[in-house]
Image (cartoon, rainbow, N blue to C red):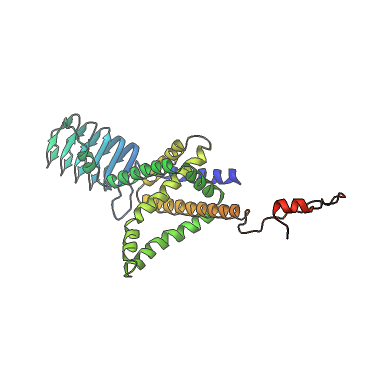
């Protein structure tokens, strides 16, 4: 059964990762609203006649011959524009080339050179040799910035949880692998009950502080569940007793890569939070049951056993009058 669950998890993860590989580098046609193009490593091509929203590439190139309604941002790589960009064109660690028919309504910023052919039009500023500070890439990332912030926080939280409770992490991973469906069921229950309890507390006078605190901590609690899910997923590929930290990193990388897919990141976040909270609930339930069973083996308040001497054939010695007088037992 354990091998079957492991194979199923790997198969599902392979399907999730295989779907965007064929579509992330290309634009989506036939949709009413332009789709954002976010790629971790690879190339994005916006062909002539195609229209997309934001374009964000961590490592690779962006070639725009069509229309980009938002910004074009590449962290490590070059940008070639022969079409139209409604926002800014930013190459944090590379160069920018503008063709003769290109049109950029925003700024063009590059860490290296900016080469503009005759006929290229830029409505904003054109600067090359730009040194980006910490704030500048975050602002330039646009829609990619929340994804980076959320998943970096999940990784930091997971490391803190492993540091504070390594055995608890093992128990939660064991519950996730041994009882996946109870973990899903309990996770949905906890995921829905927490905000409901917070709302009830807010509308009551006595529990108002508790309700506000619970509602404000929902994101933290859900992120804890997401960190536990990443650790459990990593343990599928990196078994005990090997490094817990490396298992967390493996699971985190997989979930982060899947969450980078447009319109899929929210689903991954909710599913990870639900499963992690459920696995934690199952682990706590098991721990309480084990503690109660261990406590039941030693009952308190029982009577001390009475030792009855074994019967012998020798008669008991009689107490003479002199001994009774020495002991003060005489009449």
Q: Report the residue that reaches farthest toward the bottom.
A: 204
Q: Nearer the viewer, residue 286 or 302?
A: 302
Q: Is residue 168 visible?
A: yes
**Residue 183: percent from the left, percent from the top?**
51, 54
* Tally of numbered tags: 0
Q: Quadrant of the C terminus?
A: bottom right
**Residue 194: percent from the left, percent from the top?**
40, 61
Q: Which quadrant of the structure image shows residue 293?
A: bottom right
Indicate left or right for 328 with 195 as reference.
right
Taking 214 as reference, is 234 above or below it?
Answer: above
Indicate left or right for 206 with 330 as reference.
left
Q: Is residue 264 visible?
A: no
Residue at coordinates 16% horizontally, 41% vertically from top-left? Answer: 103
Taking 157 as reference, is 119 above or below it?
Answer: above
Residue at coordinates 51% horizontally, 49% vertically from top-left? Answer: 176
**Residue 8: percent from the left, percent from the top?**
54, 46
Residue at coordinates 31% horizontally, 37% vertically from top-left? Answer: 58
**Residue 279: percent from the left, percent from the top?**
49, 52
Indicate left or right for 69 with 157 as reference.
left
């Amino acid at each position: 059964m354990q091998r079957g669950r492991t194979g199923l998890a790997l198969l599902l993860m392979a399907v999730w990762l295989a779907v965007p590989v064929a579509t992330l580098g290309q634009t989506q046609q036939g949709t009413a609203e332009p789709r954002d193009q976010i790629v971790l490593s690879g190339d994005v091509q916006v062909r002539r006649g195609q229209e997309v929203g934001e374009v964000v590439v961590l490592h690779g190139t962006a070639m725009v011959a069509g229309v980009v309604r938002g910004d074009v941002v590449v962290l490590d790589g070059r940008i070639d524009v022969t079409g139209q960009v409604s926002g800014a064109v930013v190459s944090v660690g590379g160069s920018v080339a503008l063709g003769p028919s290109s049109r950029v309504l925003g700024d063009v910023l590059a860490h290296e050179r900016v080469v503009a052919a005759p006929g290229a039009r830029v409505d904003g500023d054109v600067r090359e040799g730009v040194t980006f500070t910490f704030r500048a890439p975050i602002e330039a990332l646009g829609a990619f910035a929340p994804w980076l912030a959320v998943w970096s926080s999940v990784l930091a939280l997971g490391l803190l949880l492993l540091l504070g409770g390594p055995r608890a992490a093992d128990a939660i991973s064991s519950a996730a692998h041994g009882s996946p469906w109870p973990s899903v069921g309990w996770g949905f229950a906890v995921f829905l009950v927490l905000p409901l309890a917070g709302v009830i507390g807010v509308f009551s006078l006595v529990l108002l502080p508790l309700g506000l605190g619970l509602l404000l901590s929902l994101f933290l609690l859900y992120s804890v569940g997401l960190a536990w899910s990443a650790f459990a997923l990593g343990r599928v590929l990196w078994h005990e007793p090997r490094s817990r930290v490396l298992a967390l990193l493996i699971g985190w990388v997989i979930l982060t890569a899947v969450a980078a897919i447009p319109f899929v990141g929210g689903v991954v976040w909710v599913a990870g939070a639900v499963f992690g909270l459920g696995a934690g609930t199952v682990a706590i339930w098991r721990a309480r049951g084990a503690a109660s069973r261990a406590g039941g083996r030693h009952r308190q308040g029982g009577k001390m056993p009475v030792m009855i001497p074994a019967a012998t054939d020798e008669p008991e010695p009689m107490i003479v009058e002199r001994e009774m007088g020495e002991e003060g037992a005489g009449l």
